[in-house]
Image (spheres, helix red, strand yellow):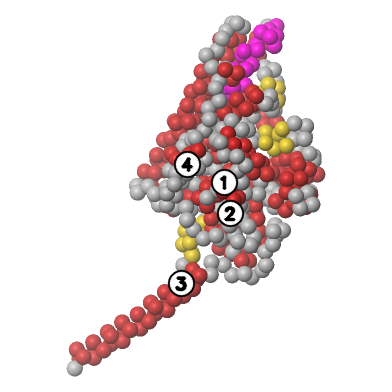
Amino acid sequence: MMLLLAAMVLAAGAAVGAAALAVNIMERKQEARNPFYRVVELTDDTVDPAIWGKNFPLQYDDYLRTVDMTRTKYGGSDGVPRAPTATDPRTTTAQSRLEEDPRLKTFWAGYAFAVDFREERGHAYMLEDQTFTERQHVTKQPGTCMHCHASVYVPYKKLGEGDLIKGFEKMNQMPYTEARKLVEHPVACIDCHDSQTMQLRVTRPGFLEGIRALKASQGVQNYDVNKQATRQEMRTYVCGQCHVEYYFKGPEKRLTYPWANGIKIENILTYYTENPHKDWTHAETGAPVLKAQHPEFEMYNQGIHARSGVACADCHMPYKREGALKISDHHVRSPLLNVNRACQTCHNWPEAELTQRVTTIQDRTFELRNRALDAVVALIGDMKAARGAGKTDADLKTAMELQRRAQFMVDFVEAENSMGFHAPEEAARILGIAMDLARQGQLAVRQPDYTPSLFPSTTPSVKPTEREVTPPPGSAARGTGSGSPGGSGGTSH
């Protein structure tokens, strides 16, 4: 009798458990069918991310967390307290790289970066840090800078009376202070997502034109990134809208990505030779030099992750589960702060092992960076002494050209915010060449008729392959997902 009673109790419990499981499964399926709830209507003019957040609270909560300041060994910021002033209301800034490495003041002598250059902070600070940098007080920056530091899609449209490109052209020509009045937010939802379909899209004219020029160099004419790119490519392209090398072209200060010959550093240097450009004249040597910006997209495309079809978002905004929903983590940050989801999805090794691998790569790159920087600074010192001894531009012509190349190559790695991790072999190659060019420059100071073994005017243009910007078919195992805001973005280390 007792056995029968026990069996009945067990059977009843099992039935209740099965019913509860069935209900739970049904609820989860229902959640999955509704990746978001339309609380408010979004339009192509809805700029404020807080409004988008009403429909997408999970992603918006992550987005707000980009205010975090957490330092890794070679990036990020602990935050430095400061006293607000009438011209700068910030109570916290990032550490000064110029104080950490005074060589950079010599490196950029005569340029605004020699006055203020700091560690990077999260996307939440991208607009205010540029607005209040001391560089604003030593140079007249144009409205072009808004392209990557603010949510400009709607301001461009308004300025161009519905025409994105015309608005872009108008803002480029404005003084920075005037353009700043037209924007309100740093990068926001609308910059990467279509408001009706939530599909990823490129909204920055600089990238629209740059990728078209790059594809043309590969034989693909009239490329339209928003129509022809795959979803996995878009998970990199929306980040590549801003994390790139660029310059201000002509008196109209048109933002231009120098990709017409390709995106390897030789291609870019060839472009700057064929389309003569200098960012400033070096104050100590008189050389017409270049300032690299933040070429994460270009460097990443030379690395193993790009070759394997891994997108920026896979590492910097990895997928996660929230109930039955699969979304991208919009707390955009270094993968080193999120190794479990950013790295271990593909790499089946302990977190400590993976972190050590990254650190080893970065330590080695940093050592090469220091040696290359020493070489360029030594060249600058020799050229400055030669000027003091009466040597002319004609005497130093070869040395100035070698400084221009070597300095840009060192700066390309310095400004690329992964300390070599995105493409370790490429970073080492670039720094090795930079050291050689700088040492040849020192020889050229002593021997005005010296003929260098590598010179911009004789360097052939190295055309990139299609795979440098297009992941191999079928390799994007992690790159699927819904069309919700769970699929965008990326940032630097």
Q: Which residue is drawn at 46% across and 72% down?
A: 29
Dot 4 surroundings within 10 Å: few (below 14), some, or many (20 or more)? many
Q: Which residue is drawn at 61% across and 56% down?
A: 193
User: Label 4's element?
Assistant: helix
Can residue 244 be seen by looking at this rendering? no
Q: Nearer the viewer, residue 278 or 316?
A: 278
**Majority secondary structure of magenta residues:** helix
- Going from N to C along the chain, the mark reached first, 3 or 2, is 3
Amino acid type, callout 1:
Tyr
Q: Name the residue under label 2.
A: 200
Q: Which of 227 and 345 is in front in this view?
A: 227
Q: Which residue is drawn at 58% across and 43% down?
A: 240
Q: Residue 306 carries which label?
A: 4
- Proximity of marks 4 and 1: CB atoms separated by less than 8 Å: no
- Going from N to C along the chain, the mark reached first, 1 or 3, is 3
Amino acid type, callout 4:
Ala
Q: Give the range drawn in magenta.
A: 390-411
Amino acid type, callout 2:
Leu
- Proximity of marks 3 and 2: CB atoms separated by less than 8 Å: no
Using the numbered discs, state the Cα–Cα distance from disc 1 to disc 3 in whole angstroms: 32 Å
